[in-house]
Amino acid sequence: MSRICAITGKRPITGGSISRKGQSKKSGGIGTHVTKSNKRVFRPNLQRKRIRLPNGTVKRIWISAKALKSGKVEIV
């Protein structure tokens, strides 16, 4: 499955998760320090739904939850 929304074009994007250790200065420590940085992927919330296309046919497509909630498509 390609993780791309057929309506909005949302797709996975890459980012990072940063691990920090130590006690914050606010609570009496010397501050937090970065100990590790890992790559990660933010995936869109896709649902497989049957929708009615503008020409009247019904088709199953992968669609993002945001497009469903905003009413951009007519669900059958």
Image (tube, grey):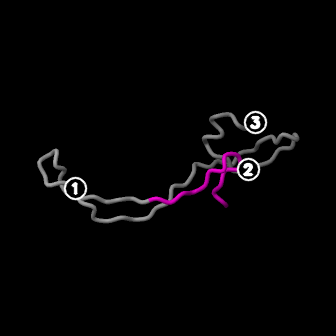
Q: Position of residue 29 (x, y in %)?
A: 13, 52
Horizontally, residue 36 falls left or right of residue 51, namely: left
For the residues labelled 1 and 3, the Cα–Cα distance comes to 50 Å
Residue 70, image quadrant: top right
- Which residue range is magenta in the image? 1-15
Of the numbered discs in the image, which one, if any, rests on residue 17?
Answer: none
Q: Nearer the viewer, residue 4 or 32?
A: 32
The nearer-to-camera label among 2 and 1 is 1
Reply yes or no: does residue 12 show up in magenta. yes
Alpha carbon distance from label 3 to label 2: 12 Å
Q: Are marks 1 and 3 in contact (CB under 8 Å)?
A: no
Q: Is disc 1 surrounded by few (<14), some (14 to 19) or many (20+) residues within 10 Å?
A: few
- Kindly indicate whether the residue at mark 2 contacts the one at mark 3 (C-beta within 8 angstroms): no
Task: Please give the residue where the numbered disc 2 appears in the rendered image.
Answer: 61
For the point 64% across and 47% down, which residue is it?
47
Q: Amino acid at mark 1?
A: Thr
Q: Earlier in the sequence, mark 3 or mark 2?
A: 2
Q: Secondary structure at mark 3?
A: strand
Tell me if residue 71 comes above or below residue 19 in the rendering.
above
The kind of residue tagged 2 is: Ile
At a point 36% along the width and 64% down the height, the residue shown is 37
- Which quadrant is the N terminus positioned in? bottom right
Front label number (1 vs 3): 1
Residue that badge 3 annotates: 74
Q: Are there few (<14), some (14-19), or many (20+) residues within 10 Å of tag 3?
A: few
**Could you say whether the residue bearing mark 2 is in a helix, strand or loop?**
strand
